[in-house]
Image (cartoon, rainbow, N blue to C red):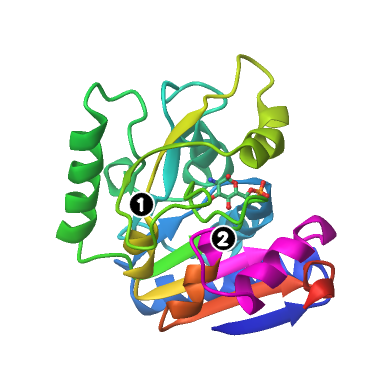
Amino acid sequence: MEVIIRENEEVACGMVARIIAKAVRKKPDLVLGLATGRTMEKVYAELARMHRDEALDFSACRTFNLDEYIGLEQDDVNSYHHYMDEHLFRHINIKPGNTHLPDGTADDLKAEARGYEEKMCACGGIDLQLLGIGQSGHIGFNEPLSSLMSRMRDKVLAPETIAQNGPLFKTGAMPKRAMTMGVGTILESRRALVLVTGEGKADILAESVEGAVTSRVTASALQLHPHCVVVVDEAAASKL
Ligand code: GLP
């Protein structure tokens, strides 16, 4: 695991966007794993700018998001489907058929989880997986005590996650469950790219990258990833 410290959030986000852009230019049909959350908004804005100003071409790129809330329709403003359209997809030339998010409204969630992993597999697996870290130490929605071998499945959200993401729900209550790629699924990506910014993440970042590998902090499993880069700003790095 390589940890890169940048002076502030803007520089850290710009670096992550450039790493993604370089991977897309090198392999136009890149299979990109995507994450949501406030941390990623500046990265997606920068990728949209690169598409507009630097002809960054996503037309052959395939994407798979990590997770989605259970019970939210795709057009619900709180859904991750909506987040991805708002922050990235509608600003770039990605083909709608090439973007994938789990369907949190599926009647049979087990079948949905299996089908999603099969689609990832049929595309050749994730080349580059973008990740943030939640206050509970989660990656995706792999809450504390998720098996480090886990696959895509539905998870009950931890109280810290409900406290962290609840305020983002302007309409309706935040679902208490989500569909998420498992820790095992994430560890199979060829490269992992983690972005963590802000003082509020300093403790959980230190536990994740310098603490024991434990299912209590699922981000710590990334220490086992053979090719993982963690980009952080000085505020997030303050407890390292
Ligand atoms: C959600 C997502 C995670 C993400 C986390 C961080 O919980 N499931 O994949 O890493 O948010 O959120 P933020 O960037 O808002 O701190």
| Residue 128 visible at all | yes
- Residue 231: horizontal and vertical position, in percent? 65, 74
Q: Which one is nearer the viewer's eye here, 119 or 45? A: 119
Q: Which one is nearer the viewer's eye here, 6 or 135? A: 135
Going by the numbered disc 2, the residue's amino acid type is Val
Q: Which mark is residue 206?
A: none
- Residue 171: horizontal and vertical position, in percent? 64, 15
| Residue at the disc numbered 2 | 217
| Residue 21 visible at all | no
Q: Quadrant of residue 59?
A: bottom left
Give the magenta-colored segment's residue range: 193-219
The residue under the point 55% across, 54% down is 138
Q: Secondary structure at mark 2?
A: loop
Q: Quadrant of residue 166?
A: top right
The residue under the point 29% across, 66% down is 29
Q: Quadrant of residue 111?
A: top left
CA gap, disc 2 to disc 1? 23 Å
| Residue at the disc numbered 1 | 64
Does label 2 or label 1 sit earlier along the sequence? 1
Q: Secondary structure at mark 1?
A: strand
